[in-house]
Amino acid sequence: MAYTIKNKVRDYLERLPELRENKLKLIRAIWEDECSMYHINTMEGFMDALLAGKLSHPETLRRTAMVVANENPHLKPSIEIQLKNKEMELKMRGGKGDPS
């Protein structure tokens, strides 16, 4: 079985429960490991690697984390964070839509 982004995200969420609470921390952790793997240690190197597609795309990581959490309820963030995220989502939509 190939080691996919989905497997990578699941591994991080299982090993580091604090990353379940904040997607930006998850992205940072994955990028830090990827930068280490590619021997990237400058901002210029980081930006070049990101633009070249060597690093995982942040939106892909965010969406994958959501899929993994939905498939593995024990990897979801706390109820408080889930409610906060739902409130933020509603605010971004201008309060429109069904809040359930």
Image (cartoon, rainbow, N blue to C red):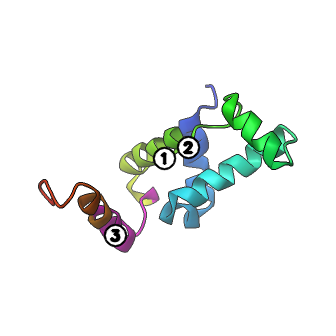
Q: Nearer the viewer, residue 4 or 36?
A: 36
Pinpoint residue 57: horizontal percent, then vertical percent.
Answer: 58, 37
Cα distance in 3D space between marks 3 and 2: 21 Å
Q: CA distance from mark 2 to mark 1?
A: 6 Å
Closer-to-camera residue (56/93): 93
Residues 60 and 72: in front is 60
Q: Quadrant of the C terminus?
A: bottom left
**Mark 1 Cα-neighbour bin, 10 Å: few <14, some 14–19, many ≥20:** some
Overall secondary structure of the magenta section: helix
Secondary element type, mark 3: helix
Q: Which residue is mark 2?
A: 58
- Write down the region rendered in magenta: 75-86
In the rendered view, does 93 fall on the left or right side of 33? left
x and y, in percent, of residue 89 in the image:
29, 58
Per the model, the C-alpha gap separating discs 3 and 1 is: 16 Å
Q: Amino acid at mark 1?
A: Arg
> Please, what is the three-letter code of the amino acid marked with disc 3?
Lys
Would you name the residue on which mark 1 appears?
A: 62
Does label 3 or label 1 sit earlier along the sequence? Answer: 1
Circles 2, 1 touching at the beta carbon (< 8 Å): yes
Q: Which residue is mark 3?
A: 84
Q: What percent of the width, then of the height, locates residue 2?
A: 63, 26
Q: Residue at x 32, y 64 (%)?
A: 88
* Marks 3 and 1 close (CB-CB < 8 Å): no
Secondary structure beneath dot 1 equals helix
Using the image, determine if residue 8 lies above or below residue 52.
below
